[in-house]
Image (cartoon, rainbow, N blue to C red):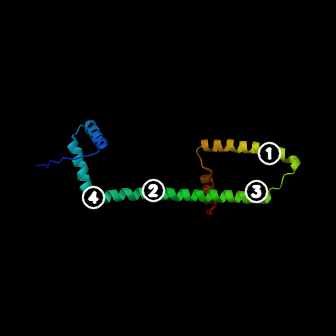
Amino acid sequence: MSRARLNLFIQPEHAKRLNELAITKGVSKSSIIAAALASWLSPDSGDQRETAIAKRLDRLSRQFERLERDQHILIETVALYVRYYLTVSTPVPEAHQEAARAQGKLRFSQFVEQLGRHLQRGRSLVRDVHDEVQATGEHP
């Protein structure tokens, strides 16, 4: 079988990687380039690339939908909490403000500790809320 000789110019980085691959696989650089070219020129290669890209896009779409859902849950949670807090909380008299600040610092410290434990367990509060809502048949 006759073969055509080509003189190619490639980036030094590609030449280095091609050389390393040839050594590692124990094949010639020409055979690697021939296989890559055959794959590129194959009528199925376009379909294979399109299928691979479609799979990646589908995965990214699902990830984006989950992020969008989680963001929606977080926004609604914060909004509901702020509304509740502003509606229910009463002003603290001047005489009790120092004690209220100390209690607030303690509560915040406890909150941060609890959040840290929750994150270390690897669970997501947003995921827990979503699972609870789905279990009750409601949709966020």
Left or right of 99, for residue 135: left
Label number found at residue 51: none
- Circles 3 and 1: CB atoms closer than 8 Å: no
Q: Residue 133 appears at what percent x and percent y?
A: 63, 59
Cα distance between the residues tagged 3 and 1: 16 Å
* Residue that label 1 marks: 101
Q: Sequence order check: which comes first, mark 2 or mark 1? A: 2
Q: Sequence order check: which comes first, mark 2 or mark 3? A: 2
Q: Residue at x 54, y 57 (%)?
A: 66
- Circles 2 and 3: CB atoms closer than 8 Å: no
* Residue mark closest to the camera, 2 vs 1: 1
- Circles 2 and 1: CB atoms closer than 8 Å: no
Cα distance between the residues tagged 4 and 1: 69 Å
Q: Sequence order check: which comes first, mark 3 or mark 4? A: 4
* Residue mark closest to the camera, 3 vs 1: 1
Q: Residue at x 51, y 57 (%)?
A: 64
* Residue that label 3 marks: 85
